[in-house]
């Protein structure tokens, strides 16, 4: 075990840690980086030299624009502050509690945070492209972002749940409704096709649909369905395939625009309300994975 590491004044510690005095005082108040000594009479703060590793970790995390609450979680996983300070005050400088040892838990927290950043950036990139085209009056160029395809959909028996919902509440309601319907579908042999969401009206800050979630099932003839259900008529539809990042509102509106513009250019019209068709595990998908078709049934 090595000797006790030297104590550093707050000024020296600030210079060596790349942190300002203001930042150090803030992190002390938050319990994020606490000095090992505070003078009872003069209030002078002193830090142990080994705390520089924690300080520099905080600097790097903040350069990732990580919020302080998440920084605190990473620091706690990498070097629990309470254990570190108590060991330092006891003069046990050689303890691993005073070091930033390898920490898979802390590394996982950083990875999770950065994945969330990449999801946000991917969504914002798609939105910026959509807005740029609108502001330049390049509505026709929206079609260049997508490949419109066609397919025939057979008649389906679907379990349904419908609700008036505004855009702020749409995503959580969809997740809950799909979970409920998938659970119900399990009583009838499970889903027989992709989940789809029908927009019977606009959903935005002022309009609330309604929206209908549908889960196809393959019930046997004569089977009693003890749940809201209906027959979805056979139809032909035009659709574009989009990624998880593009599903975010309002980015997804460009996909709806693209199909609507294609139908107009082809002299076709929409038979019934447009829908989103989810053909894979949305939660497990990466931002760049294709997860959804925006589809318009054609008349």
Image (cartoon, rainbow, N blue to C red):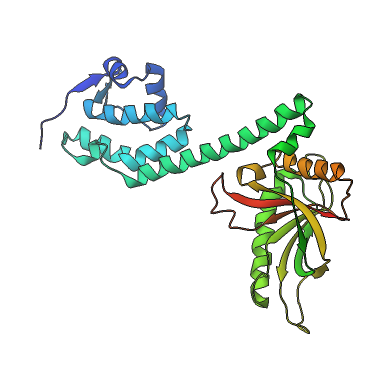
Q: In this view, does 44 lie above or below 31?
A: above
Tell me where residue 274 appears, x and y as whole percent. Answer: 80, 52
Q: Is residue 93 above or below residue 242?
A: above
Q: What is the count of numbered marks?
A: 0
Residue nearest the viewer, comparing 153 with 182 = 153
Tell me where residue 23 appears, x and y as whole percent. Answer: 41, 21
Tell me where residue 270 appears, x and y as whole percent. Answer: 87, 51
Residue at (47% x, 40% y) in the render: 113
- Of all residues, the one furthest to the bottom in this rendering is 222
Q: Can residue 271 be seen from the camera position used here?
A: yes
- Of all residues, the one furthest to the front in this rendering is 266
Residue nearest the viewer, comparing 258 with 14 = 258
Residue nearest the viewer, comparing 1 with 293 = 293
Image check: 73 left or right of 41?
right
Can you say which quadrant of the picture contains the C terminus?
bottom right
Q: In this view, does 208 lie above or below 212?
A: above
Residue at (77% x, 50% y) in the render: 165
Image check: 272 left or right of 1?
right
Tell me where residue 238 appears, x and y as whole percent. Answer: 78, 52
Image check: 283 left or right of 65?
right
| Residue 99 occupies quadrant | top left
Residue at (18% x, 39% y) in the render: 95
Residue at (16% x, 27% y) in the render: 5
């Amino acid at each position: 075990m090595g000797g006790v590491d030297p104590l550093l004044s707050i000024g020296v510690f600030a210079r060596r840690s790349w942190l300002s005095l203001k930042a150090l005082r803030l992190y002390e108040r938050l319990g994020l980086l606490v000095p090992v000594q505070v003078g009872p009479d003069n209030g002078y703060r002193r830090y142990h030299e080994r705390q520089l590793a924690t300080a520099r970790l905080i600097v790097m995390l903040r350069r990732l624009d990580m919020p302080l609450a998440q920084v605190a979680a990473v620091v706690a996983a990498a070097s629990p502050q309470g254990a570190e300070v108590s060991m330092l005050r006891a003069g046990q400088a050689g303890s691993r509690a005073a070091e930033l040892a390898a920490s898979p838990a802390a590394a996982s927290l950083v990875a999770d945070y950065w994945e969330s950043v990449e999801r946000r950036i991917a969504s914002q990139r798609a939105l910026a492209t959509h807005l740029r085209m609108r502001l330049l009056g390049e509505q026709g160029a929206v079609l260049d972002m997508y490949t419109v395809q066609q397919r025939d959909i057979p008649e389906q028996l679907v379990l349904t749940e419908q609700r008036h919902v505004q855009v702020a509440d749409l995503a959580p309601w969809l997740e809950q409704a799909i979970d409920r319907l998938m659970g119900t579908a399990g009583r009838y042999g499970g889903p027989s096709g992709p989940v789809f969401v029908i927009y019977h009206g606009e959903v935005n800050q002022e309009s609330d649909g309604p929206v209908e979630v549908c889960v196809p099932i393959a019930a046997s003839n004569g089977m009693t369905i003890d749940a809201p259900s209906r027959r979805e008529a056979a139809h032909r539809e035009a659709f574009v395939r989009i990624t998880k990042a593009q599903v975010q509102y309002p980015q997804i509106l460009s996909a709806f625009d693209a199909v609507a513009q294609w139908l107009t250019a082809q002299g076709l019209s929409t038979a019934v309300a447009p829908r989103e068709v989810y053909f894979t595990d949305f939660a497990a998908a990466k931002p760049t994975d294709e997860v959804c078709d925006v589809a318009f049934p054609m008349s």
